[in-house]
Image: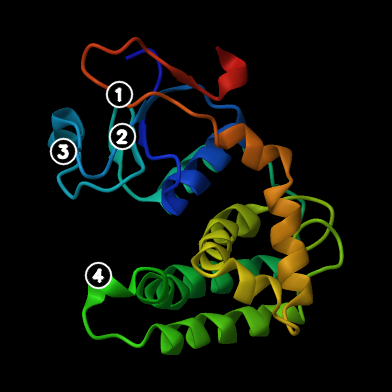
Amino acid sequence: MKYPILYSFKRCPYAMRARMALQLTNIKCEIREVRLNNKPKHMLEVSPKGTVPVLILNDRTIEESMEVIDWALNQKNVFEGNLKENQIKISDELIERFDDKFKYHLDRYKYASRYGDVDEIHHRNKCEKILLEIEDIISDEEWFFGKKINKLDISILPFIRQFRIADADWFDNHKRLKKVKNYLHNFLASKILKDVMINYDVWKEESEISYFPITNR
């Protein structure tokens, strides 16, 4: 296998953050865009859990987005030297908090009908509480800690993006999330997001190979 194979779904926040790590580290891979309601047989053979991203390497298969990020950064740590020790600690704590609590409540807010009798406003409030907690520590610059993008940014912004999509009017008119809204706005206008939100045809066994990042074609 000449290049790693990445199974991905454009709008999935987990796949999105994995693609950002691969884009920033400029790791070329064969990308296979899938639809989660019609998963390819090969993807399920290598990763029976059936979620994206899936990154197939010569020696192993990586099935979790944070593991894809860590693997990419082990190849080329583009964030090295960007942060102070306490900022690294904050990053680790917030990534865990978003992956655990924020995503749990986000799913039940954005996709309430999938979970039966749930109070979507309750779950929105839980997400809001976490965003209010970070409001006071986000920088006034482009990214969370300043002018340079870091692991924390690519890890949590796809989830904040989804949170806004659930009710854009409510989010955009929120009076107490000024820094969070600016932080997300900067992300939505960023080159990195544009670079990873390329449209690919859905992959089939007979499809021609497509590569990611697009600049490496």
Q: Position of residue 76 (x, y in %)?
A: 61, 35
- Check disc 1: other Cα within 10 Å, few if <14, some if 14-19, many if 20+: some
Q: Sequence order check: which comes first, mark 2 or mark 3?
A: 2
Q: Position of residue 45 (x, y in %)?
A: 13, 35
Q: Secondary structure at mark 1?
A: loop
- Residue at point 62% right, 18% down? 215
Which residue in the structure is indicated by mark 4?
A: 114
Residue type, numbered disc 3: Leu
Q: Sequence order check: which comes first, mark 2 or mark 4?
A: 2
- Residue at point 29% right, 13% down? 207
Quadrant that contains the C terminus: top right
Between disc 1 and disc 4, the foreground one is 4
- Discs 1, 2 touching: Cβ within 8 Å: yes
- Discs 1, 4 touching: Cβ within 8 Å: no
What separation in Å lies between label 3 and label 4 (alpha carbons)? 23 Å
Q: Sequence order check: which comes first, mark 1 or mark 3?
A: 3
The label shown at residue 203 is 1
The label shown at residue 34 is 2
Residue type, numbered disc 1: Trp
Residue type, numbered disc 2: Val
Which residue in the structure is indicated by mark 3?
A: 44
Residue type, numbered disc 4: Arg
